């Protein structure tokens, strides 16, 4: 019964990952609102989020006004979706428990969301500070890529640690004794 539940949840996670990547609009809107709230702390002037869209602007109605649009290529859906597919495959394999796999997936997805939000806020801050030509170009191509790369590495590390930490050895493995009596005489 447990194996069947794990397999069904695994299939659901993998399907959810595919659906998330195919239907990312709602997630992008949520990311836009969250990024605008975070970027408001590091950009000048008032923040404006275009309702129902993927764009936000700071220093609204001033000559310094700039904005960002969260494009499909920049959404966290394309980071979390593959993670869900991987978690689904791991669950369906039956090698890890449901609770451990869900914990690992949740932790890793959280790291990916934070990394992507940090990337967006970095881009907004750099654009506000140095303008589009210098700030946006550098932060979007180099800085943002570094932030997300580090985030992916941390997410995968967290996933592996959460998935395998404290895992009991399988029944077929034997433990090596700490002290061996071979070669010693009894006194």
Image (cartoon, rainbow, N blue to C red):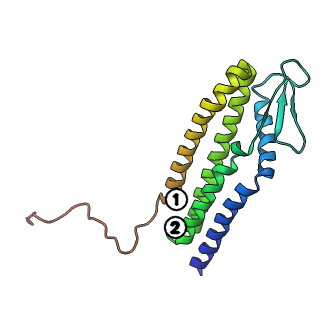
Q: Quadrant of the N terminus?
A: bottom right
**Left or right of residue 75, residue 97 in this image:** left
Who is closer to the viewer here, 103 or 52?
Answer: 52
Q: Position of residue 91 (x, y in %)?
A: 57, 68
Residue 100 in the image, given as x and y percentages of width and height = 56, 62
Label whose residue precedes the other's in the sequence (1 or 2): 2
Name which residue lies at 73% across and 23% down: 132
Q: Position of residue 93 (x, y in %)?
A: 52, 71
Residue at coordinates 68% horizontally, 60% vertically from top-left?
18
Compared to residue 49, the image places residue 176 above or below, namely below
Q: Residues within 10 Å of mark 2 (few under 14, many from 20)?
A: some
Element class at badge 1 = helix
Q: Are marks 1 and 2 in contact (CB under 8 Å)?
A: yes
Q: Residues within 10 Å of mark 1 (few under 14, many from 20)?
A: many
- Image check: 53 left or right of 14? right
Residue 45 image label: none
Q: How many marks?
A: 2
Rendered image quadrant of residue 8: bottom right
Quadrant hosting residue 48: top right
User: Which residue was labeled with disc 2?
Assistant: 96
Measure the alpha-carbon separation of dots 1 and 2: 7 Å
Quarter of the image for the C terminus: give it. bottom left
Residue 163, label in figure: 1
Q: In terms of secondary structure, where does tag 2 sit?
A: loop
* Residue for point 60% across, 51% down: 108
């Amino acid at each position: 019964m447990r194996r069947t539940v794990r397999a069904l949840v695994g299939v659901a996670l993998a399907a959810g990952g595919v659906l998330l990547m195919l239907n990312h609009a709602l997630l992008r809107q949520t990311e836009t609102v969250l990024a605008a709230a975070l970027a408001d702390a590091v950009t000048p002037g008032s923040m404006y989020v275009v309702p129902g869209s993927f764009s936000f602007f700071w220093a609204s109605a001033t000559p310094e006004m700039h904005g960002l649009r969260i494009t499909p290529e920049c959404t966290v859906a394309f980071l979390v979706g593959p993670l869900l597919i991987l978690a689904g495959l791991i669950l369906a394999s039956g090698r890890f428990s449901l609770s451990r796999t869900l914990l690992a997936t949740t932790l890793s997805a959280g790291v990916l969301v934070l990394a992507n939000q940090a990337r967006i806020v970095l881009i907004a801050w750099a654009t506000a500070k140095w303008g589009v030509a210098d700030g946006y170009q550098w932060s979007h191509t180099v800085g943002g890529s570094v932030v997300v790369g580090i985030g992916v590495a941390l997410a995968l590390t967290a996933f592996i640690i959460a998935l395998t930490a404290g895992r009991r050895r399988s029944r077929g493995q034997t433990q090596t004794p700490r002290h061996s009596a071979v070669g010693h005489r009894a006194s």
